[in-house]
Image (cartoon, grey):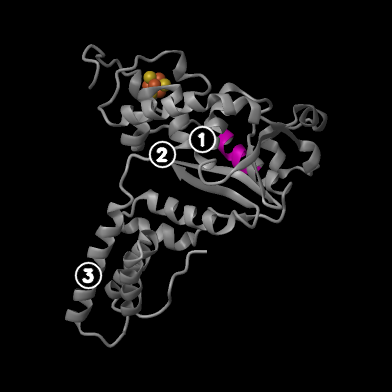
Amino acid sequence: MVKLCEGSPGVYLEAARECVGRKAYAEGAVNAWWCVKYCEEGEPYGMSVEGMQSMIRESQAVLRKCKKHFESNRLSKTTFVYGCICRRLLWLYKNRNAMRRISEATRKKFDAGHVIGELAQRLFPDGVDASAIDADRVIDMTRVSLPFNIRQQLWLEQTDAWFRTRTVYEAAFVYDDVFAAVDILVNADGRHIAYEVKSHRSVTDTILRDCALQYYVISRSCRLDDFFIVYVDENYLDELGLTVEEVADANVDIERLFVVESVMSRILPMQDEIRAKVRECKDVLAHGEPAVKPGEQCSTPYECMFAHYCRRGADYSDGYY
Ligand code: SF4
């Protein structure tokens, strides 16, 4: 668990300096941020106004230094999959995120995915969640515009502290500037087995590519002995007369709800393809908005969140906008 200190602004500032000294930039930024927050709130620590202002200036300098280590065009599992669907989708997601329009149907699918993911954790009940990071503080930090990558860094540190000895939910790793978190990473007496949970009823090519990317990233830090996809057993759902969206509120038999299928032999041969695709995605992000005409990719596998923008009648003649 990331350790944050308690105390006066001076204690936080001292901790921030110490963190930067040992290159723990995420932790340093959090401590510096708390120093600023307490100074600005004027908490009665017996300091002069000048003293407080000086501390704020120094903390902000520490924050700037830390932030530099989190500014990158890092890919994630999500952005990689978007890049495989459409180069323009990847670019827009990273650069014009505020323009997204997510339909109610897609939102329901995402929500169902979260519910199914939590249900699947019951198959391995002794795990710890690496993504559960002092949520209040991280949310607060967004007020000073700390990049999301800092949250990823805390998440990575927690995974690193736990995965060698415990089963970890949302186990996160980074390699080749790609961030990937697998839903469940089981530690079975030193053997590591990854389980990726999907609310789908079968294994699709998109799911396989998603898992192949995870293997590409995770296997650099953790030798994986097997990789499984956990998906919903449609026969059991039909028997219950439920949709995936309705499973959360139902009394279901967790063991019967899921099909667990190894995909190791299918994702290993995909590693060269994944490496090349990562290069391609990074190249997309290094340039301007790609000129991709709307087509089948806009509605398959789901309605694109930027369809309203791309279908507005743009001129594609220049190659780039
Ligand atoms: S609407 Fe179509 S062309 Fe535009 S980003 Fe989405 S998938 Fe790509």
Q: CA distance from mark 1 to mark 2?
A: 9 Å
Element assignment for label 3: helix
Q: Quadrant of residue 55?
A: bottom left
Residue under label 3, please give it.
Answer: 58
**Residue 114 in magenta stretch:** yes
Which residue is farthest bottom?
46
What's the residue at 52%, 57% (across, down)?
158
Vertical order, 50 against 302 (above or below)? below
Query: Is residue 63 toward the left or the right of residue 248 in the image?
Result: left
Q: Amino acid at mark 3?
A: Glu
Q: Which mark is residue 176?
A: 2
Q: Is residue 79 in sight in this rendering? A: yes
Q: Are marks 3 and 2 in contact (CB under 8 Å)?
A: no
Labels 1 and 3: the sequence-earlier one: 3
The residue indicated by pointer 1 is 216
**Earlier-in-chain disc, 1 versus 2:** 2
Front residue of 191 and 107: 191
Q: Secondary structure at mark 1?
A: helix
Q: Main secondary structure of the magenta part?
A: helix
Up the image or down, 281 lies above or below 296; here it is below
User: What amino acid type is highlighted by mark number 2?
Assistant: Asp
Name which residue lies at 57% across and 32% down. Answer: 211
**Pointers 1 and 2 in contact (C-beta within 8 Å):** yes
Q: Amino acid at mark 1?
A: Tyr
| Quadrant of ligand 1 in image | top left
**Magenta-colored span:** 109-115
In the visual, does 209 lie left or right of 194? left
* In this view, the mark in front (3 or 2): 2
Would you say the beta carbon of the disc 2 residue lies within 8 angstroms of ligand 1? no
